[in-house]
Amino acid sequence: MHGSQQLSLFNAHYDERCFLPIHIYEAASGKPVAVILRPGKTPGGAEVRAIVKHVVRRIRRHWPKTRICWRGDSHYARPEAMDWCEANGIDYVFGLAGNDVLHAQIRAAADDLCVRRAEAGDDKRRTWTELRYAAKSWAKERRIIARLEASSRGFDARYVVTTLAHAPQPLYETVYCARGQAENLIKLHKTQLASDRTSCRSPRANQFRLILHTAAYWLLHSLRAALPAASSWAVAEFTTLRLRLIKIAARVVETTARIRIRLPSAYPDKVIFRLVASGFAPAGP
């Protein structure tokens, strides 16, 4: 926080006052879907359901037959959101916080994994299993995938809840763990575009700041998409694009018919700049 902004709350996990905005991205392209300012606390079930419902309805308005799958961490594994998704034909894969009931169901598999790792002398071993589980707040049992890992440092278990029918290992490693890419997208939005500069007092003004930063994200995302797919530019971070293609010295010469940009002869990226500029500029006479 930068002061006494409205909606700022103290969060014990971060040990400071903060916002906890929700970032939603389309997984395949990295395009932003929604960035919503919210208080610095874990979202409740009604809030998650409202956001999921709103975003799905907007998507369905344009692509009524597209299959939608939500992926998120354990904050989104709320019964209200899962019930709504199941009632409306929406798939999901959410992280799930472990508890004594889940740990008890995997104890036999966990003991076997630890013994086999110790006997083989391996530094680390993993296995995956699935089970049926219903928390007290859930209306029914749901499919749970458990990732079990035994190493020289101890034992660790992670869980996801899902409607998908994939085998446990690819569902966890390929489908769910790809959620880590969202952290990189948030880094582009927050660190490289300074979207954490929510320094206005009013939450409406700070939400508008997030909209402006998201517009900047779209511009740089579109710029990167126009670059050759087979080059390193296609995966360049926004800071690289800004430093090498935008923040460059040039002389602008305006005439009656056109505007000329004269780049320095020593500019190392003039070839890619010419390619991008010609692609975005309208066709000449």
Image (cartoon, rainbow, N blue to C red):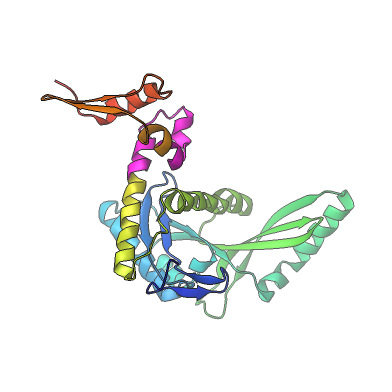
Q: Is residue 3 above or below residue 170?
A: below
Q: 100 or 223, which is in the foreground? A: 223
Residue 281 is covered by the magenta coloring: no
Q: 51 or 234, which is in the foreground? A: 234
Residue at 48%, 51% (x, y): give it.
187
Give percent across and percent down for residue 202: 31, 71
- Identify the magenta region: 219-241
Q: Is residue 92 above or below residue 44?
A: above
Considering every residue shown, the one lying at the far bottom of the view is 136
Placement of the N terminus among the 4 image quadrants: bottom left
Give percent across and percent down for residue 27: 44, 49
Q: 189 or 267, which is in the foreground? A: 267
Q: Is residue 128 left or right of residue 263?
A: right
Give percent across and percent down for residue 6: 37, 74
Considering every residue shown, the one lying at the far left of the view is 256
Placement of the C terminus among the 4 image quadrants: top left
Which quadrant of the structure image shows residue 136?
A: bottom right
- Provide the major secondary structure of the magenta segment: helix
Can see residue 65? no
Can see residue 179? yes
Residue at 77%, 57% (x, y): give it.
150
Q: How many marks?
A: 0
Which quadrant of the structure image shows residue 229?
A: top left
Q: 229 or 232, which is in the foreground? A: 232
Give percent across and percent down for residue 174: 57, 48
